Amino acid sequence: MSTRRPFGFTVAVTAAVLALLSGALVAVNMVQGIRLDFSVPDTSRLVSSAHQTISLEANQQLEPLDESAVSITPAAPFSVATAANRLAISFESTLAYGTEYTVQVKGIVGSFSTTPRTETTTFTTPDAAVVVLRQSASGDSLVAVAIDPMGEDTVLFEAAEITDFAVSGDRVLVATADTDLSKRLITVGLRDREVTEVELPGDGYASDLDSVPEYGLLGFRFDASVDASDFAFDRVLFVAEGEGTPRAMVALDGKPLQVFDWRFIPAKPALVAQDLGKDLLLVDLRPDRDLVPLGNYPDLLSVGRDGKSVVVGDALGMSRYDLTVGSVETISFDQPDGQIAYPSDAVWLADDRGVVRSFSVINPQTHLFEERVTLEVGGQTHTLFTSADSEASVIEVSTSPNDAYLLIETAVGEGESSTAVFDLAAGEEIARFVGSGAEWK
C-alpha cells in the first residue's frame, strides 16, 4: 500500500534541494574564483569587415563595464556591451593587416568575486595578400601573392583555362574551361587545395563570380550554351549558401532574375543586381524580404567596402547611391585646369574618407587621351597613376577590404596585365606584380 505525502511537504523538499544546489554552486564559485576566457573570431574577418566582436566570458555574472575599462593597442575604435556573464568588444572599423593587437580589460568584477581583475589577450591579423590569375599558352594558374616584397608566390590551382574566380574565406570559387571544351564551376581550398564541384543548373557556364565570406555566400550568373536544349535559366543570377545547391534569384514579377551585372554587398547577406532592362535592384537574402527598386542606371560600377553605397553611371557621368538613406549624389570629375574629364570608374572609401577616381583627359600637346587615377582625401587630391608616364592602360581599380590599399591593374596593348599596390594612407606605390583580377585573400 502506497502512502501519499502532502503536496506542501513535496514542495518544501524540492525547495530545500534547490537551495542546497544553489548554495553549492555559490560555494564552488567562491572557492574557485572567477574564470575568464577570451573568444577571438577568425582574424581574417577583422581585416575584411567592421563590427567584428571579441568576447570575454566568465563563469559568473559580470558587473557592467564601459569603454574606459578597455584598452586596445595599437588604437582602434570600439564599443563595449555587458550582458550577464559576457563582455562584448566590437570594433567599429576594420583592422590593419599584419599587426599584433593587445586587448586589455581592467576592473572585472563578478557576482561572487568582488576583487577587481585584469585580463589581456593578444592576436595578430593576417598579412596582406591577393590571389591573381596568370595566363600562358600552356595553361592558366591562380597564384597567391604576398604584398610584402619579401613574400613568396604560391600556386593554388592550375587549369587549361580559368575564365573567372572569386575568393571566399578559405576557399576560392573558380570557373574553368577544360581542354575538351567542357566547363565547370568548382571551389578550391586555399590551404588543402581540395577541389569540390558546384552544381550548375544546366548545360552552360558560370560568369560574374562573387562571394561574401562572412556569410558563406557564393554567387554567379549562369549562361546557357548556344546549343543548349533549355534556356530557362540563361543569364539568371544564382546564389549558394556554403555547400548548398545554388538557387535562382527571383525578380519582381516572380520569374527567375536575369541580370546584366551584379555585386554582393560586402559583409552583408545582400546584393545589388542590374537586370537586363538596366533597372537596379537591392536584394536582401534574409527570409521574407522584398526586392527594393533603386532606379534605372546605365552602369553598376562599384560597391563600397563598408556596404553603405554603390557607384552608378548615369546621364551626368557618375553618382554615388547611398543605400542607407536612398540619396543620390553626383561625383564630380571637374579638373583644376578646366580640362574635360571622361570618367571610367570611381570607388568610394568607407566612412566617407575619400574617393578614388579613374578617368581620361585629352593631352593638349599630343591631343591623345591620357588616363589618370586620383585619390581625394581630406580635400586634397593626389595623382596615383597617369598613362603619360607609361604606355599602359587602366583595366580596373579596387580597394582592399579595409580600404587600406588600392590596386590598379594595367596592361600594355594585348600584353599581360600587371597590378600596382598603393598604400592609401601614404599615397605611394608599395608593390607590383604580374597577374589580373586580383582578389584579396
Image: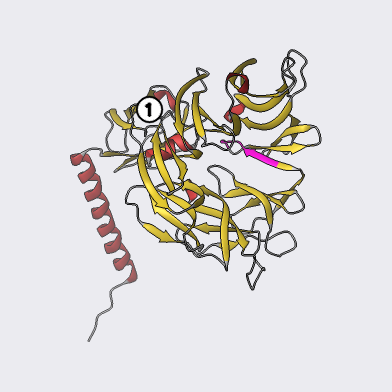
- In the displayed structure, 42 sits above or below 8; it is above
Of 377 and 437, the residue lying toward us: 437
* Residue lying farthest to the top in this orientation: 337
For the point 30% across and 59% down, the residue is 15
| Figure quadrant of residue 34 | top left
Of 438 and 98, the residue lying toward us: 438
**Count of numbered marks:** 1
* Residue lying farthest to the left in this orientation: 31
For the C terminus, which image quadrant?
top left
Of 403 and 182, the residue lying toward us: 182
Secondary structure under the numbered disc 1 in the rendered image: loop
Which region of the structure is painted magenta? 300-306
* In this rendering, position of residue 438 left or right of residue 33: right
For the point 55% across and 45% down, the residue is 268
Of 223 and 50, the residue lying toward us: 223
* Residue lying farthest to the bottom in this orientation: 1
* In this rendering, position of residue 20 left or right of residue 441: left
Residue 11 visible in rendering: yes
The residue under label 1 is which amino acid type? Asp
* In this rendering, position of residue 89 left or right of residue 228: left
Q: Residue beneath label 1, please? A: 148
Q: How far from the left and from the top, in percent, is residue 353?
A: 59, 24
* The stretch drawn in magenta includes residue 178: no
For the N terminus, which image quadrant?
bottom left
Q: How far from the left and from the top, in percent, is residue 209?
A: 55, 51
